[in-house]
Image (cartoon, helix red, strand yellow):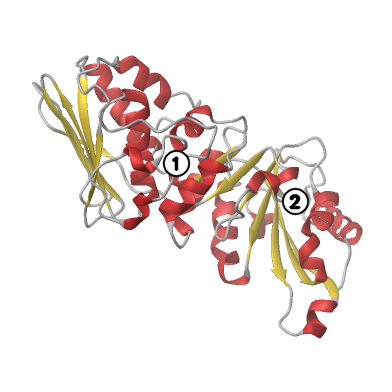
């Protein structure tokens, strides 16, 4: 069911949601959180589709905030709120409200969103593109327990990681980090089987791929060994090689779907490691709403800790003053690091091993 409201108010939208819910035969509220999507007209369809698919696992009230400030001074001086309410099969398992903020109202989205939040339910804000420099200080970000960005959508993804490190607040996360969950789980499981000291690591992936950088930073932080970043043709993250006293552990995914795991003294095996769509990533992030300490420690490691950069983005500062210092590439190569430490950090996010 769909209801269109033109030049409306938040109270009328709330009344429209109740009316639509009753008309569809589901008067009870069975949603567990409010997901606020801050987007534009060009990206609204894909973002809403992904959120709708994720709502089948996490029934949510989805609020799509679409700002339309206007092009002319006259349009920018006016304020108008238009809304489209979707309930039932048009909105997954929850309810969706598309909010189009015209004119000056576009600068005060929080005043429109606040009355529409589900009472006593967590709030998650997602910026599919054009994320603010400091999500926690954004007016909408201040309403949320969880703030999701995507460095891969930035013009300079690696620079975006530096911004995320400088402005990190508990509750921040990034889909570039979510994309490497299966890789971290697989590598942790491999090291659980092979209790050998890791002396060096190589991470291969497309240039300007933030997930590749984050995986390298995670390995550098958890294993405390030199990590080399190599550029490949993709798609995305393609391989990780860990040097040990017994030989090389290699997880190679050349086609973006099926990976091959090679370990010393064991036959090579194929493992499913497909590239996941946005709906799966959002569903994973909604499973946990408390701060992700491993992401915080990883993003603050700094891209400059990785060697072998083939792109200029690795030349700038990564860590703000007063935060975790960078560790030079002369870290003791032979330092013994237990595999259990890596496994614990990979699986610390409940339900994220896939």
Q: Position of residue 259 (x, y in %)?
A: 22, 41
- Crowd band around label 1 with a 10 angstrom C-alpha radius: few (<14), some (14–19), many (20+): many
Please identify the quadrant where the N terminus is shown. bottom right
Question: Which residue is denoted by mark 2 in the rendering?
Answer: 139
Taking the image as drawn, is residue 215 in sight? yes
Please identify the quadrant where the C terminus is shown. top left
Q: In the displayed structure, would residue 219 be above or below residue 306?
A: above
Residue 220, quarter of picture: top left
Q: In the displayed structure, would residue 313 be above or below residue 4?
A: above
Q: Nearer the viewer, mark 1 or mark 2?
A: 2
| Label 1 – label 2 distance at C-alpha | 24 Å
Q: In the displayed structure, would residue 229 be above or below residue 37?
A: above
Q: Name which residue lies at 77% across and 64% down.
A: 107
Q: Position of residue 230 (x, y in %)?
A: 22, 47
Instruction: Tell which residue pokes out farthest to the front in this image.
Output: 321
Q: Name which residue lies at 66% across and 43% down.
A: 59
All told, the count of numbered labels is 2
Question: Which residue is denoted by mark 1 in the rendering?
Answer: 177
Q: Name which residue lies at 55% across and 57% down.
A: 128
Whether residue 50 sits left or right of residue 138 in the image: it is left
Q: Secondary structure at mark 2?
A: loop
Residue 157, quarter of picture: bottom left
Q: Position of residue 30 (x, y in %)?
A: 74, 39
């Amino acid at each position: 069911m769909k209801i269109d409201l033109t030049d409306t108010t938040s109270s009328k939208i709330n009344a429209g949601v109740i009316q639509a819910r009753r008309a569809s035969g589901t008067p009870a509220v069975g949603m567990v959180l409010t997901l606020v999507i801050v987007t534009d007209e060009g990206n609204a369809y894909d973002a809403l589709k992904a959120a709708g698919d994720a709502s089948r696992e996490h029934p949510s009230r989805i609020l799509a905030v679409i700002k339309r400030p206007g092009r002319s001074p006259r349009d920018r001086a006016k304020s108008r709120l238009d809304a489209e309410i979707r309930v039932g099969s048009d909105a997954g398992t929850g309810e969706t409200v598309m909010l189009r903020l015209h004119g000056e109202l576009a600068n005060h989205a929080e005043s429109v969103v606040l009355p529409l939040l589900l009472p006593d339910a967590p709030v998650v804000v997602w910026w599919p593109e054009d994320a603010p420099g400091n999500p926690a200080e954004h007016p909408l970000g201040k309403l949320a327990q969880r703030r999701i960005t995507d460095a891969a959508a930035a013009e300079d993804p690696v620079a975006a990681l530096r911004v995320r490190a400088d402005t990190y607040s508990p509750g921040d996360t990034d889909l570039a980090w979510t994309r490497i969950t299966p890789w971290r789980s697989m590598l942790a499981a491999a090291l659980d089987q092979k209790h050998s000291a890791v002396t060096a690591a190589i991470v291969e992936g497309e240039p300007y791929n933030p997930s590749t950088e984050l995986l390298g930073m995670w390995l550098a932080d958890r294993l405390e060994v030199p990590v080399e970043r190599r550029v490949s043709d993709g798609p995305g993250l393609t391989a990780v090689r860990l040097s040990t006293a017994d030989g090389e552990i290699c997880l190679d995914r050349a086609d973006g779907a099926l990976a091959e795991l090679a370990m010393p003294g064991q036959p090579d095996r194929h493992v499913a490691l497909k590239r996941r769509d946005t709906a799966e990533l959002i569903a994973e992030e909604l499973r946990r709403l408390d701060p992700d300490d491993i992401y915080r420690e990883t993003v603050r490691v700094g891209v400059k800790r990785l060697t072998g950069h083939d792109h200029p983005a690795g030349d700038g500062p990564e860590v703000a003053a007063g935060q975790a210092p960078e560790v030079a590439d002369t870290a003791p190569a032979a330092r013994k690091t237990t595999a259990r430490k890596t496994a614990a950090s990979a699986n610390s996010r409940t339900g994220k091993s896939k």
